[in-house]
């Protein structure tokens, strides 16, 4: 398969993390990078031997760029995505794809008109842990799913990113920053969501940035920083979700799914791999499930949190003509659920989810993992 030319827009914090994932994949080759800050684009190209760098316009005019990977901050995502689609490029955007559903509908329509693909992060649900969990469910090993829990709580948002401003603005917050990993995994495993109820709180509005390489000292939170939500899936299964930038510590699992015949515990959906454990109703211990695919990276290594599988999946789909796993219906539905968590918080009412999607195909033994 001829490799697919990638152009990356946005050379900030996550750029190197993507490069670590993309350079190890033979389906893609990064041919150019761009940033509004030209020095950042030049330095990023230098660090990774990327043949060309410069402005976004130059990247969009480069015939060698087939797919634009959009790594700009959330408020900029749609502007870059639309410009790339209009320039005839396929697009893979970081999450959230947009801040509202109207913009996503427009982008999906534009992709249809231009005959280009539109995909979006996260891609961790394509990794070994999520796919192993998916196989457990598809094989009926824990019976019919009845309920689930999903927790991601911490107080570190201001301690690791040199400029965490976007993490506390619209498009950020724990719901839109962390939620995509969880809701994508749950929809991939359990199917679409029918309704959402949620409440929120902000523990601390003024965040003092403590990241050692910080570029800002203080960020004011403009979005809720603690959300507790209930999801009802179309299947009838119900899920408790808690997403927070306000919890100093906790003893909570990441994700658990409870079936009629047993229970399953999953690894952190922010990474690709990790143990999947099941305990059957007549069992006495939590037992590891054999992974359905080789690990993406060494156990416990930082490479568990690299990115790029979704780009490789999109590239393979372009060449082979099959649907990509982060397709429009799926990413639209996941975003509708995430935005409904925020809407329900504001309206203090249960929010109905209008969209439905198919679960993405199982990834075990597909080309992107070969
Ligand atoms: N940082 C991470 O570890 C991480 C992990 C997963 C996902 N993400 C997602 O990746 C995206 C980027 O995050 P980040 O942490 O790298 O942000 P960042 O602020 O560090 O970097 C964003 C880059 O985009 C550039 N930019 C801004 N507007 C632009 C425009 N109009 N055209 C071209 N370039 C522009 C900025 O100059 C900056 O270099 C976000 O959507 C975030 O949710 C980040």
Image (cartoon, rainbow, N blue to C red):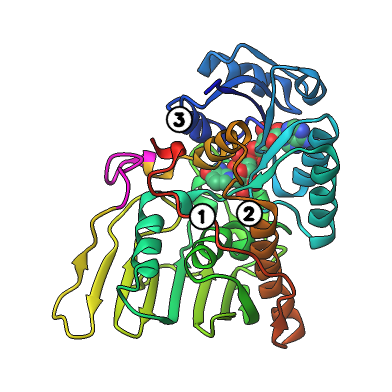
Q: Is mark 2 within 8 Å of ligand 1?
A: yes
Question: How many angstroms separate mark 3 from mark 2 (CA)?
Answer: 23 Å
Q: Quadrant of residue 313?
A: top right
**Which residue is pictured at 74% across the width and 59% down the height?**
170
Q: Earlier in the sequence, mark 2 or mark 1?
A: 2
The vertical placement of 279 against 321, above or below, is below
User: Which mark identifies residue 251?
Assistant: none
Question: How many angstroms separate mark 2 from mark 1 (CA)?
Answer: 31 Å
Query: What segment is highlighted magenta in the picture?
Result: 292-303
Q: Earlier in the sequence, mark 3 or mark 2?
A: 3
Disc 1 target residue: 361
**Which residue is pictured at 56% across the width and 14% down the height?**
46
Disc 3 target residue: 20
Q: Earlier in the sequence, mark 1 or mark 3?
A: 3
**Which residue is pictured at 51% across the width and 74% down the height?**
242
Tell me the element at label 2: helix
């Amino acid at each position: 398969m001829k490799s697919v030319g990638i152009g990356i827009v946005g050379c900030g914090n996550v750029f190197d993390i993507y490069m670590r994932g993309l350079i190890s994949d033979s389906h893609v080759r990064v041919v150019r990078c761009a940033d509004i800050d030209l020095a950042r684009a030049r330095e990023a190209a230098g660090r990774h031997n990327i043949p060309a760098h410069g402005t976004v316009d130059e990247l969009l005019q480069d015939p060698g760029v087939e797919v634009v990977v959009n790594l700009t901050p959330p408020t900029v995502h749609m502007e870059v995505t639309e410009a790339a689609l209009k320039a005839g490029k396929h697009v893979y955007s970081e999450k959230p794809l947009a801040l509202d559903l109207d913009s996503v509908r427009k982008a999906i329509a534009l992709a249809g008109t231009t005959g280009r693909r539109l995909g979006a992060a996260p891609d961790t649900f394509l990794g070994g842990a999520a796919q192993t969990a998916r196989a457990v469910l598809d094989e009926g090993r824990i019976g019919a799913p009845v309920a689930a829990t999903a927790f991601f709580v911490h107080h570190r948002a201001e301690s690791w990113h040199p400029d965490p401003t976007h993490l506390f603005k619209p498009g950020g917050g724990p719901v839109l920053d962390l939620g995509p990993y969880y809701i994508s995994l749950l929809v991939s495993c359990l199917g679409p969501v029918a309704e959402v109820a949620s409440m929120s709180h902000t523990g601390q509005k003024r965040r003092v940035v403590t990241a050692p390489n910080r570029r800002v000292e203080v960020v004011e939170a403009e979005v809720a920083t603690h959300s507790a939500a209930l999801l009802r899936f179309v299947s009838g299964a119900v899920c408790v979700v808690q997403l927070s930038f306000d919890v100093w510590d906790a003893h909570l699992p990441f994700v658990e799914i409870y079936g009629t015949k047993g229970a399953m515990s999953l690894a952190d959906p922010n990474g690709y791999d990790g143990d999947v454990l099941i305990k059957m109703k007549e069992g006495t211990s939590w037992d590891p499930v054999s992974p359905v695919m080789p690990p993406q990276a060494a156990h416990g290594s930082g490479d568990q949190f690299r990115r790029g599988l979704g780009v490789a999946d999109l590239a393979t789909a372009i060449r082979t003509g099959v649907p990509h796993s982060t397709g429009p219906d799926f990413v639209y539905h996941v975003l509708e659920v995430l935005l409904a968590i925020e809407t329900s918080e504001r309206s203090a009412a249960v929010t109905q989810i209008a969209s439905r999607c198919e679960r993405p195909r199982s990834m075990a033994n597909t080309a992107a993992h070969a």
